């Protein structure tokens, strides 16, 4: 059995990569894929890797922006469901998705009520807080757009790759897990107020812990 660990950039999982070279504590084979940033790059890279060597399990690890200021920077969460937030239109000050516009059935595989839902047992077993995520092609900085997303999706985490993992994994019927560490709050572009260092440290600690605890049969 093998597990595929994916990340948008090597910086996000650098401590794990160092650990992987030095330690031999895993009971199964681990492959690593750096997908690149964004939904398009992630989809292509992940599908290409699956065609070369189909994994038994996929874990995506990365940092992300948070809509909830009550969640401390550096907190690691697991994403239970995802959608592509900016695959939408604003009409009469209301955000409408492709499902709202009836351009796509909300339960067309792999969607469930318009969401890409992770329902595998591993997500339920890990101790991380389970939250809702949205993926975007454009990082959200406009406060009006923040409100639109909050009103429509009630998200906690924003990333640029999460929905690609969920979509591909569900279509390919591969168990998966997405974990994110909060590096900043949404619409805060002053990077002095971010905490990337702690976010990366905590992300990698939890990534390593999850991988050690995983049953090799998945």
Image (spheres, rainbow, N blue to C red):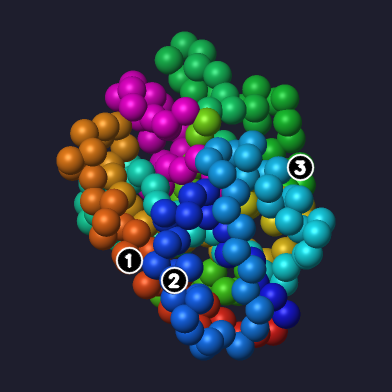
Contact check, label 2 and label 3, Cβ < 8 Å: no
Image quadrant containing the C terminus: bottom right
Residue at 78% from the left image edge and 65% from the top image edge = 54
- Decide whether residue 148 is among the magenta residues: yes
According to the picture, the residue beneath numbered tag 2 turns out to be 18
State the image coordinates of residue 28 (x, y, percent, origin top left). Answer: 65, 83
Left or right of 192 in this view: 37 = right
Residue 59 in picture, x, y percent from top left: 57, 64
**Pointer 1 residue:** 202
Image quadrant for the N terminus? bottom right
From what the image shows, is residue 197 above or below residue 206? above
Query: Residue at image x 57%, y 53%?
Result: 34
Packing grade of label 2 (10 A; few <14, some 14-19, many >=20) is few
Q: Secondary structure at mark 1?
A: helix
Answer left or right for 113 relative to 70.
right
**Residue 199 higher or lower than 89, as above or below:** below
Residue at the location (73% across, 31% down)? 104
Numbered disc 2: secondary structure:
helix
| Residue placed under numbered mark 3 in the picture | 108
Q: Position of residue 144 (x, y in %)?
A: 33, 21
Q: Nearer the viewer, mark 2 or mark 3?
A: 2
Task: Report the side of 108 relative to 95 (left or right).
Answer: right
Camera-side mark, 1 or 3: 1
- The foreground one among 188 and 198 is 198
Q: Magenta region: which residues?
A: 138-162
In the picture shown, does residue 192 fall above or below 180? above
Q: Point out the tag, 1 or 2, that comes first from the N-terminus.
A: 2
């Amino acid at each position: 059995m093998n597990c595929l660990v994916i990340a948008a950039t090597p910086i996000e999982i650098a401590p794990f990569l160092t650990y992987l070279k030095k330690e031999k504590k895993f009971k199964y084979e681990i492959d690593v894929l750096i997908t690149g940033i964004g939904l398009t790059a992630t989809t292509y890279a992940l599908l290409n890797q699956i065609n070369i060597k189909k994994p038994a399990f996929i874990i995506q690890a990365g940092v992300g922006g948070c809509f909830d200021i009550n969640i401390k920077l550096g907190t690691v969460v697991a994403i239970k469901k995802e959608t592509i937030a900016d695959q939408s239109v604003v009409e009469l000050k209301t955000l409408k998705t492709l499902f709202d516009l009836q351009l796509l059935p909300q339960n067309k595989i792999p969607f469930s009520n318009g969401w890409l839902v992770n329902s595998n047992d591993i997500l339920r077993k890990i101790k991380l807080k389970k939250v809702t995520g949205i993926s975007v092609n454009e990082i959200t900085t406009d406060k009006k757009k923040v409100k639109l997303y909050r009103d429509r999706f009630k998200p906690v985490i924003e990333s640029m790759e999460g929905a690609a993992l969920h979509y591909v994994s569900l279509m390919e019927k591969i168990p998966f897990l997405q974990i994110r560490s909060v590096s900043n709050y949404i619409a805060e572009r002053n990077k002095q107020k971010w905490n990337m260092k702690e976010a990366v440290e905590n992300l990698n600690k939890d990534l390593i812990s999850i991988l050690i605890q995983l049953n090799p049969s998945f």
